[in-house]
Amino acid sequence: AQSVAQPEDQVNVAEGNPLTVKCTYSVSGNPYLFWYVQYPNRGLQFLLKYITGDNLVKGSYGFEAEFNKSQTSFHLKKPSALVSDSALYFCAVRDEGTYKYIFGTGTRLKVLA
Amino acid sequence: EAGVTQSPTHLIKTRGQQATLRCSPISGHTSVYWYQQALGLGLQFLLWYDEGEERNRGNFPPRFSGRQFPNYSSELNVNALELEDSALYLCASSEDGGGTDTQYFGPGTRLTVL
């Protein structure tokens, strides 16, 4: 069965510092991986996805994610955090059989000024 | 281009009543997905509709149902509401439901059951 784990409930980082939000996955076939961000009382906004190709995926708002097959990880990164990046981040894997997304439990990112 | 829209924004019902939530996908998208985001439980997959047919459902009781209309909009019905149905219900759409299509989410409907 496909699954996604986000080991950190919360990540704190100072503005201007690099940030990493961790995600590991378990899939039986090819991994289709996604990152979404959710601001308070809002829906999810798509950030980026990995389907195939380069292990470093670039997305919206300066975010990128590194796909690592040997470590089954898909960590979200940004070189320089902004206070406005503070939000809830979800990693998701697409189930190959049903096409539904399986979401991690979310990581709350807090960027401190 | 307009995104996924959902109505109403908020819905307050009492236990035992029925709730109807609506979703309009992005123009050109034929697949609609419903998710429940309950406090402390994360996002749980509810239903997937594509081309008017229910393609898959999550681990929810039959009182959660829905349909997709010829214009690809969708509604989610929740019968015999229970207190634990209180949650944010998110709708997402994608171009055709298969392949590597990205799901784009609406702002959600906050359902409160009293």
Image (spheres, rainbow, N blue to C red):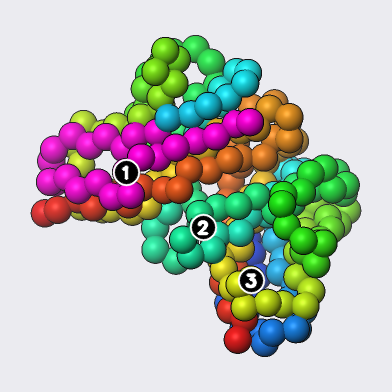
- Distance Cα–Cα, label 2 vs label 3: 12 Å
Q: Which residue is mark 2?
A: B41
Q: Is A67 above or below relative to B1?
A: above
- Residue B45 visible in the shown view: yes
The kind of residue tagged 1 is Glu
In the picture provided, is A34 more to the left or to the right than B98?
left
**Residue B95 or residue A25, whichever sits in front:** A25
* Residue at 77% from the left image edge and 49% from the top image edge: B57
Chain of the residue under label 2: B
Query: Residue B87: where, in percent of width, then height?
Result: 57, 68
Do discs 3 and 1 belong to a common subunit? no
**Residue A55 lies in the magenta-colored region:** no
Q: Secondary structure at mark 2?
A: loop
Q: Is residue A80 left or right of residue B61?
A: left
Q: What kind of residue is marked 3? A: Asp
Marks 2/1: CA–CA distance: 15 Å
What chain does mark 1 sit on?
A: A
The residue where tag 1 is placed is: A8
The residue lying at 17 percent from left, 45 percent from top is A13
Residue A23, located in which quarter of the rendered image?
top left
- Helix, strand or loop at label 1? It is loop
Residue A95, relative to residue A10: is it above or below? above
Magenta range is: A1-23
Question: Of label 2 and label 3, which has the lower sequence position?
Answer: 2
Q: Amino acid at mark 2?
A: Leu
Assess whether mark 1 and mark 2 are in contact (beta carbons under 8 angstroms): no
Q: Is residue A29 above or below residue A90?
A: above
Screen quadrant of the C terminus of chain B: bottom right
A6 is within the stretch colored magenta: yes
The label shown at residue B85 is 3
